[in-house]
Image (cartoon, helix red, strand yellow):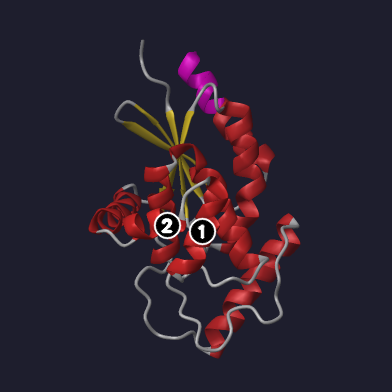
Amino acid sequence: MSSPPILWYFADPMCSWCWGFSPVIEAVRAGYGERLSIALILGGLRPGTTAPMTASLRDEILHHWHEVHKMTGQSFSFDGAMPDGFIYDTEPASRAVVTVAELSPESIFSYFKSIQSAFYVGQQDVTRAETLAELATQYDIAAETFLAHFHADTAKQKTVQHFQTTQQAGVRGFPSLVIQQGDKFEFIASGCLPLESVTSQIDAWLQNKDG
């Protein structure tokens, strides 16, 4: 029996459009989980950033947040977000998801959403290992266990592999959905599209496959 097609979800936990897309990917997972194997790839939005955010960059990012809120209705806490000195490095949050994928594979999507909610609504600093470890405790992962795996070279290397896979797949923006059947890949959606648009693309692909 051949293995089911894989729907790869390319996203970043600190990508506001991915936060806006969260209800859509949840609905897709609920509706297509029996016909597709749905997996998460950490895209690498701003990995390795070391400079504190400038006021102009903060204004630019907050503008995107307002756009996402207006388009999707997702909640944001705007006032006081990304305070002075904040370094917008998305690598730690991505590595945290990779870490949880090792320790509790079934929790990967839920934990990914927990980081998003903590950042966009809770105004928590999800670039800090301690914050990410505390979020992991919601999934019965001890903070000490999480931190040991999070700081290990294996987690760092696997995170880089996620970023490299994204580049090799030709993904240039998040969120993106790609279906893989065997060695064939097809882009299904790119950007924060409404559920109806995404499901119509998936349905068309499935119909073509079965036809």
As drawn, 129 above or below 62: above
Q: Which residue is mark 1?
A: 13
State the image coordinates of residue 206 (x, y, percent, origin top left). Answer: 52, 22
Please report whichever mark, 1 or 2, sits nearer to the chain's N-terminal start: 1
User: How many marks on residues?
Assistant: 2
State the image coordinates of residue 154 (x, y, percent, origin top left). Answer: 25, 53
Local SS, label 2: helix
Q: Which residue is mark 2?
A: 96
Q: Which residues are magenta?
A: 204-211
Q: With 56 as the anchor, is 146 left or right in this view? A: left
Q: With 133 as the anchor, is 72 left or right in this view? A: right
In the image, what residue occupies the spot 49% across and 55% down?
174
In the image, what residue occupies the spot 36% across and 15% down?
2
The verdict on residue 176 being magenta is no
> In the rendered image, which quarter is residue 104 located in?
top left
Q: Are marks 1 and 2 in contact (CB under 8 Å)?
A: yes
State the image coordinates of residue 80 (x, y, percent, origin top left). Answer: 67, 82
* Screen quadrant of the N terminus: top left
In the image, what residue occupies the spot 44% across and 52% down?
97
Q: Amino acid at mark 1?
A: Pro
